[in-house]
Amino acid sequence: MLNKGLYNAMITSVGHYVPDRVISNKFFEEYLDTSDEWIRTRTGIQERRRLDKDIPTSFMAVKAIEKLLQNRGIGIEEIDLIIVGTVTPDMIYPSTACIIQEKMGATNAWGFDLMAACSGFIFSLTTAIQFIQSGSHKKVIVVGADKMSAITNMEDRNTCLLFGDAAGAVLLEPTEDKTYGIQDAIMHIDGKGGKYLHQLGGGSLHPASHETVDKRMHFVYQDGKTVFKEAVKGMADVSYQIMKNNKLKPEDISYLVPHQANLRIITACADRMGISMDKVMVNIHKYGNTTSATIPTCISEYWHEGKIKKGDNLVLSSFGAGYTWGSILLKWAY
Ligand code: COA
């Protein structure tokens, strides 16, 4: 249970960015032993977006933040803190937060990157909440941004068709009305999952070498079947738990905002919560799995379409490499 401070943290603006280049399932049919039908039925993905080779993750994050600032009608100088959830930083260091800060001229902000794979956004959001609740920060940006095309092996049919590139951002501000904003958060990690989903190369254990390149250790590895089972259980359990802890019935939930890894994981989660699919935010068919970006991109798209209204209860849930998983409950405030 979230330990409430002086204020509640509420989302007061959103923005997202997806690259223009669309990669359809047909693209993979042309050179891999796969089919549009297999990809659609096993994952729910129809197409995904790809950023150009020489453009980094920070480019998409900046675009998402520009939209967010425009929607709120404020300048970047008002921002106190920028937290970036990503597994595809522009480089190991400096952090992507520093790069964004410099690119945008965010002269009054500090910031850092947070790595929790597909849970990167909700772990970052949970971290950001603390700075708002304590009263120490007034405007905090949380970005989930990933250029997954930079770390996917295009010859591996088990992974290459799952991922896409995108960025989504939210602005957090304090409210004294504690009925609004983020109400609860449950986060978990379990390092036993590391062997089933990882990128081994490039860290201090396996620094970049001819060998790490030859062995394709700079790409995503996933034992899909094992991760699938854990994801179904982990995401459904934690989503159900947050409902139970807050005495919410299915009819009290306006939207489930699930991490978009596989449509079958999403429907299993909705089933467990007892909610129908019309209350589930879905964009996996258009973008695939964009890792840290899936949840903020969904929220931003639905908001721009006028589908979220003040007072709506949203449950944000994710599961990813680590393993990392968790759920956040919030009441939409604007
Ligand atoms: N095209 C066609 N066939 C494929 C394929 C592809 N791209 N990839 C795998 N297959 C084959 C397999 O070889 C297997 O064939 P076999 O039965 O003859 O051995 C069959 O399809 C089923 O493979 P399987 O791995 O069991 O598929 P699946 O139903 O588990 O779906 C994933 C694969 C990756 C889509 C699914 O496991 C998944 O979504 N995993 C979890 C992803 C996730 O949540 N990650 C965490 C966050 S990133």
Image (cartoon, grey):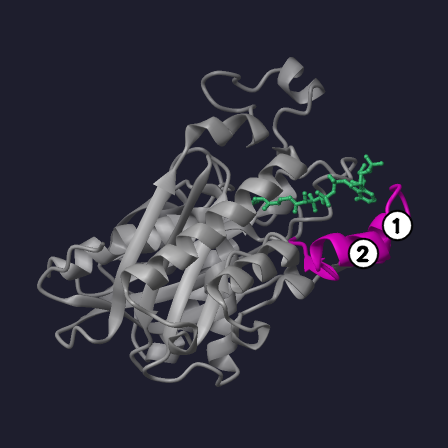
Q: Which residues are magenta?
A: 25-51
| Mark seen at residue 309 | none
Q: Is 312 part of what is drawn in magenta?
A: no
Task: Tell me how far mark 2 sits from mark 1, CA to CA.
Answer: 7 Å
| Mark seen at residue 29 | 1
Residue 127, how many percent across, how many down? 27, 50
Tell me the amino acid under the disc marked 2: Asn
Q: Say whether mark 1 is within 8 Å of ligand 1.
A: no
Give left or right: position of 102 versus 145.
Answer: left
Observer-nearest residue: 132 or 71?
Answer: 132
Residue 150, how many percent across, how many down? 62, 41
Secondary structure under badge 1?
helix
Query: Marks 2 and 1: CB-CB under 8 Å?
Result: yes
Tell me the amino acid under the disc marked 1: Glu
**In which quadrant of the rendered image does the C terminus lie?**
bottom left
Observer-nearest residue: 285 or 201?
Answer: 285
Q: Residue tagged by mark 2?
A: 25
